[in-house]
Image (cartoon, helix red, strand yellow):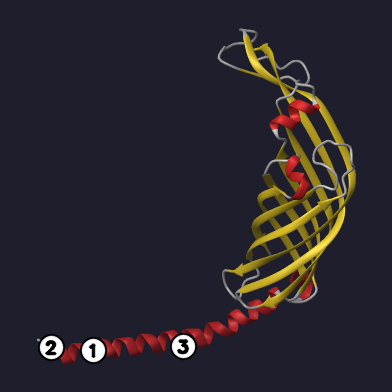
Amino acid sequence: MSTPLQSIQTATQRISKLALVCLLAATVTHPALAQRYKGLHSGVMGHLTFEGGGGVTAPVSGTQNYSNTGWNMLLGGGWRFNKRFDLLAEWQFNRMGVPNDLAFTQTSGNAASGNEHIWTTGIDAKYNYMAHSIMNAYVLGGGGFSRQLTSFTGGVLVPCGYSGYSGYSGFGGYSGFGGGPCVGSINVKQESSNQGELNVGTGFEWRLSPYERFKIFLEARYLKTYTPNHGLPPGYYAQFVPVTIGVRW
């Protein structure tokens, strides 16, 4: 039977051997990982970058009177000049609701709700002011083109299952085609506009490994669209803050 001292000595020897194996493995694999990292960041593919994400969009300033908090989607791609500077072509979609009292007023009581769609596409510059192996902190900004579409919808009674007339859709407690009245919806009023946009923001990126280009990002931007002063949503010079989480490569 081994004594406690012998057991400790045996465990110490095993740990030492395991540490030696790990050290040898790190010595062998580190150059391989470093070579892989160099390959991912060289050539044309090393300069291309792509992104995608989604999140929450909140109206700010006077736009709060015309829009409710909604959601956003972001897609983009571009050219990475070095570890600090990227130039991105981006497309973003924002969807928000219209306050019920505003929808009611704007349609003389014919609509109880509404929604706003805002598309933006433009060129944005991204600068990593803190660039580490695992985490980056960055600022970005740019501008381009935006389009907004606001739709006001009202309730209407239609036969259940009936969808043969443009603009109507029926749902309710009755089953079967034409089985009885159901509550549907119809676009009572729509308005749209095209204009320029500017945005500026900041965010953080995290790599799962210092030897991978795949990153998770979280960012917030200030977005200003130069919408006309016509008294309709999303208001004059509409302003929003989209907060987005996503992935970059």
Give the quarter of the image for residue 233. top right
* Sequence-first tag of 3 and 2: 2
Q: Nearer the viewer, residue 200 or 87?
A: 200
Is the Cβ of the residue at disc 2 closer than 8 Å to that at disc 1? yes
Q: Considering only vertical position in the picture, is 152 above or below 38?
A: above
Q: Which residue is mark 1?
A: 10
Is the Cβ of the residue at disc 3 closer than 8 Å to that at disc 2? no
Taking the spot 69% from the left edge, 48% from the top edge, the residue there is 58
Give the quarter of the image for residue 90. bottom right
Residue 184 coordinates in the image, percent (x, y): 67, 19
Mark 3, other Cα within 10 Å: few <14 / some 14–19 / many ≥20: few
Say whether residue 52 is left or right of residue 13.
right
* Label annotation for residue 191: none
Q: Which residue is mark 2?
A: 2
Q: Considering only vertical position in the picture, is 24 above or below 39?
A: below
Taking the spot 89% from the left edge, 40% from the top edge, the residue there is 193
Could you tell me how far apart the alpha carbons at marks 3 and 1 are, in whole angstroms?
21 Å
Q: Please, what is the three-letter code of the amino acid marked with disc 3?
A: Leu
Q: Please, what is the three-letter code of the amino acid marked with disc 2?
A: Ser
Q: Nearer the viewer, residue 113 or 29?
A: 113
Q: Which residue is mark 3?
A: 24
Q: Can residue 33 be seen by looking at this rendering?
A: yes
Q: Please, what is the three-letter code of the amino acid marked with disc 1?
A: Thr
Q: Considering only vertical position in the picture, is 213 above or below 121?
A: below
Mark 2, other Cα within 10 Å: few <14 / some 14–19 / many ≥20: few
Residue 30 coordinates in the image, percent (x, y): 56, 83
Residue 190 coordinates in the image, percent (x, y): 83, 30
Q: Helix, strand, or loop for circle 1? A: helix
Could you tell me how far apart the alpha carbons at marks 2 and 1 are, in whole angstroms?
10 Å
* Sequence-first tag of 2 and 1: 2
